Amino acid sequence: MTTELLPIGTRCHSLLDEFHREMDDLMNRLFGPPEEEDRTSWFVPDANVAETDDAYIVHVDLPGTKPENIHVEMKQGDLWITGERPDERSREDRTWHRVESRYGKFRRVIRLAEDVDRNHVEAHYKDGVLRVTVPKAESARTKRVPVKA
């Protein structure tokens, strides 16, 4: 059995991030996102966040959403993804028996690091998945230091 060693605080930090995300999701579901008048129409889309030596990579599931209805912004160290997914239930040519998809306005705020390169953030939408690449600032990238004898 192999055990992967992590830098001090990494495991705790990721657990705290997950806890904060779960609490944010719960509070948004119960009370809606803050500072919005129409809180009942917001939902929080599912997201996956990965990190490489050079960037953070975020995938957000937004099936049925048009790219022009998705807005991506960097605010301080946070990645804000907002927009709207049209409600298909308004079609009168059918009777819906089950609706499990979420519709309406959405918002997902993902806390990254402060030291990101905001000028080179890229967002691509394909097959219902938004992929956002947030490069790290040069000062935040891993730098190997050679050991001299």
Image (spheres, helix red, strand yellow):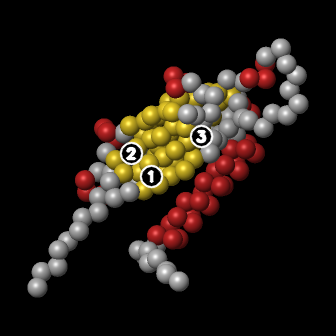
- What's the amino acid at mark 1? Leu
Q: Earlier in the sequence, mark 1 or mark 3?
A: 3
Residue 22, position in %: x, y? 65, 55
Query: Does residue 42 sit above or below 111 in this rendering?
Result: above
Q: Where is mark 1, residue-wise?
A: 112
Asked if the residues shown at circle 1 and circle 3 are in contact, with their CB atoms under 8 angstroms apart, the answer is no
Task: Please name the residue shown 57% across and 47% down the image.
Answer: 47
Mark 2 lies on a secondary structure that is strand
Residue type at the position of mark 3? Asp
Where is residue 148? Give x, y as percent: 12, 80
Q: Seen in the image, is 62 located left or right of residue 11? A: right
Front residue of this view, candidates 35 and 120: 120
Q: Position of residue 63 (x, y in %)?
A: 62, 33
Residue linked to disc 3: 61
Which is more N-terminal, label 2 or label 3?
3
In the rendered image of this protein, does residue 86 appear above or below residue 52?
above
Q: Which mark is residue 134?
A: 2
Q: Reading the chain from its start, which is encountered first: label 1 or label 2?
A: 1
